[in-house]
Image (spheres, grey):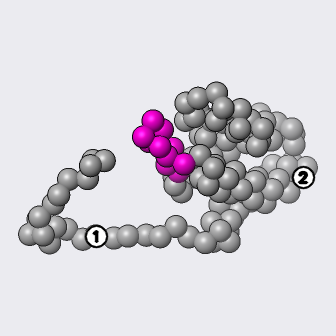
Amino acid sequence: GGGRSYLPQRFQSKFHSINFTFPEENQVKRIFGTLVNMKLQSFMDEIKPLGDLMTQATIDIFNNISAELLPTPAKSHYVYNMRDLSRVFQGVLRADQQFVDSKDAMMRLWVHECFRVFHDRLTDDPDRAWFRKMM
């Protein structure tokens, strides 16, 4: 069930199987924190310190939503992985310093990306309200 079809051993022997476990939180923070901080080096001085704050806050949001909004038969798409984290940071990394010229503008962009990645996936009003309260 769930899209898992039986594959015979003979067929499986033709492929390599690689399994990656989710990295520790400090490793995730280092990966995304380095990317964001490098991007923010070219921004104004008031924006530069936001890199570490956005990184930690995004990881906290990811951990909370992964723990609280678990998949159910009606909400089978409530499965979160590292790709969701990277999508938030991809949006932030596309920021142009001509348009994101203040601390408030960067925070609005970050909130928008979190809503785009996490909130837009939510299907019912109690889950959306929970997410808005958490933000």
Q: Is residue 45 visible?
A: yes
- Which residue extends farthest front? 73
Residue found at x 86% / y 38%: 104
Q: Position of residue 70 (x, y in %)?
A: 54, 48
- Classify mark 2: helix, strand or loop: loop
Tell me the tag on residue 45.
2
Type of secondary structure dominating the magenta stretch: loop
Image x and y of residue 68, in percent:
63, 50
In reply to whether residue 76 is colored magenta, the answer given is: yes
Numbered range of the magenta stretch: 70-80
Q: Is residue 5 magenta?
A: no
Using the numbered discs, state the Cα–Cα distance from disc 2 to disc 1 in whole angstroms.
46 Å
Report the front residue among 20 and 3.
Answer: 3
Q: Position of residue 81 (x, y in %)?
A: 52, 55
Front residue of 91/80: it is: 80
Left or right of 7: which side holds 91?
Answer: right
Q: Which residue is mark 1?
A: 17
Q: Please name whichever residue, 19 or 38, is drawn nearer the observer in this view of the structure.
A: 19
Vertical placement of residue 86 versus 27, above or below: above
Residue 45 falls left or right of residue 89: right
Q: Is residue 122 left or right of residue 35?
A: left
> In x, y percent, where is residue 29?
68, 65
Q: Amino acid at mark 2?
A: Asp
Q: So how many labels did they put on this image?
A: 2
Q: Quadrant of residue 129?
A: top right
Q: Residue at x 64, y 27 (%)?
A: 125
Callout 1: few (<14), some (14-19), or many (20+) C-alpha neighbours within 10 Å?
few
Q: Quadrant of residue 52?
A: bottom right
Where, quadrant-wise, is the C terminus in this rendering?
top right
